[in-house]
């Protein structure tokens, strides 16, 4: 099924609109925080302020998802979103668990920053695409149902 | 009455499966630690051993996915979804703040398993809070 804005229900449109706003806010806040820390040479506890600021849009995204789950009337779509969320969380947890064990077992290194966040979104997106392909309905499915119905 | 007051067949199966995966996790972690301590492995074998305990963690989330599919009670499904969202929000927030501080101040990474524990604690707390909040009196 092609991506069609007109055929989308209000809940999904809201999710996409709010999600886009959150992503833009994240980019703006990240760039702003980066510039602020770089130019003003922020140190110590004040560093927590830009760190918390860049976290707000990510929390916003989770809130947007929660709101979508509350608004979505199609149970199948709700289940798909929760499954994608589970895959994202699973990817983060696997990375965290693997990293933690390596450290416990004597490894001295560290994951690069933002690896987990990237993993979350990549896994969630990959799950979404996989489910879309897996549950694809043939273009002529409506016609088949119609023919069988009249039989 | 079972854990958190949920006693549907799906939640019972969920609790049994979680218990099994937790036991497997404990066995695998102890076996991995024992192997590394006594055989002094390094290189790719160390990486392979570190992957092993992550598998039951993945299975635990898989069990949650199966539960969400099997559970017929929409309210219980909603409680689990909300708890999952709360756990994910805390997990991502902690990781984001830590990543930012690591990037700009060179502060140390979180101790091993902090985020993992935080996720499950938040999940449990969110579930308990919702259960208490939505409790119906006996005479209602």
Image (spheres, coloured by chain):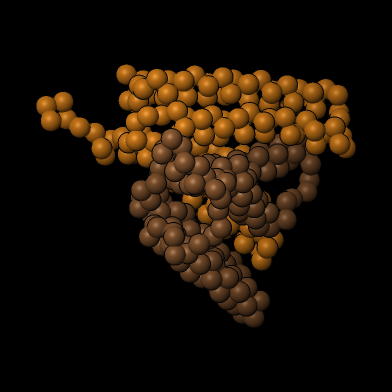
Vertical position of residue A105 compared to residue A95: above or below = above
Vertical position of residue A127 compared to residue A4: above or below = above
On the image, the x and y values in percent for residue A129 come to: 61, 50
At 52% from the left and 45% from the top, the residue drawn is A141
Q: Quadrant of the C terminus of chain B?
A: top left
At 39% from the left and 36% from the top, the residue drawn is B77
Q: Is residue A108 left or right of residue A119?
A: right
Question: Can residue B3 be seen?
Answer: yes
At 53% from the left and 71% from the top, the residue drawn is A24
Question: Can residue A131 be seen?
Answer: no
From the rendered image, report the letter of the chain displayed in brown.
Answer: A
- Which residue sits furthest bottom? A39
The one of A49 and B51 positioned closer to us in this rendering: B51
On the image, the x and y values in percent for residue A150 come to: 41, 39
- Which residue sits furthest left? B139
Report which colour depicts chain B. Answer: orange
The one of A82 and A72 positioned closer to us in this rendering: A72
- Which residue sits furthest front? A151
The one of A39 and A143 positioned closer to us in this rendering: A143
On the image, the x and y values in percent for residue B111 come to: 63, 44
Vertical position of residue A113 compared to residue B58: above or below = below
Q: Is residue B7 left or right of residue A50?
A: left
Task: Find residue A146 and report its image quarter.
Answer: top left
Q: Is residue B130 left or right of residue B94?
A: left
The one of A81 and B125 positioned closer to us in this rendering: A81
Q: Quadrant of the N terminus of chain B?
A: top left
On the image, the x and y values in percent for residue A102 come to: 75, 39
At 58% from the left and 70% from the top, the residue drawn is A27
């Amino acid at each position: 099924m092609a991506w069609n804005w007109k055929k989308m229900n209000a809940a999904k449109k809201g999710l996409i609109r709010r999600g886009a706003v959150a992503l833009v806010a994240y980019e703006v806040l990240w760039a702003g925080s980066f510039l602020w820390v770089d130019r003003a040479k922020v140190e110590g506890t004040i560093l927590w302020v830009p760190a918390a600021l860049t976290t707000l849009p990510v929390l916003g995204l989770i809130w947007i998802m929660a709101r979508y789950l509350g608004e979505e009337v199609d149970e199948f779509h709700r289940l798909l979103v929760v499954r994608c969320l589970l895959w994202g969380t699973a990817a983060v947890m696997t990375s965290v668990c693997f990293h933690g064990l390596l450290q416990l077992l004597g490894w001295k290194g560290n994951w690069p920053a933002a690896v987990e966040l990237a993993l979350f979104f990549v896994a969630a997106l990959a799950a979404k695409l996989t489910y879309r392909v897996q549950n694809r309905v043939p273009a002529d499915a409506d016609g088949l149902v119609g023919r069988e119905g009249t039989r | 009455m079972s854990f958190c007051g949920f006693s549907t067949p799906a939640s019972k199966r969920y609790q049994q499966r979680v218990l099994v995966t937790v036991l497997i996790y404990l066995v695998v972690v102890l076996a991995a630690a024992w192997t590394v301590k006594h055989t002094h492995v390094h290189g790719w074998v160390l990486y392979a051993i570190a992957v092993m305990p992550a598998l039951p963690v993945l299975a635990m989330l898989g069990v949650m996915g199966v539960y969400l599919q099997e559970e017929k009670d929409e309210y219980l499904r909603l409680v689990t979804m909300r708890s999952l969202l709360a756990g994910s929000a805390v997990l991502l927030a902690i990781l984001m703040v830590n990543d930012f501080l690591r990037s700009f101040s060179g502060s140390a990474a979180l101790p091993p398993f902090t985020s993992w524990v935080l996720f499950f604690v938040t999940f449990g707390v969110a579930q308990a809070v919702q259960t208490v909040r939505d409790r119906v009196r006996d005479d209602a």
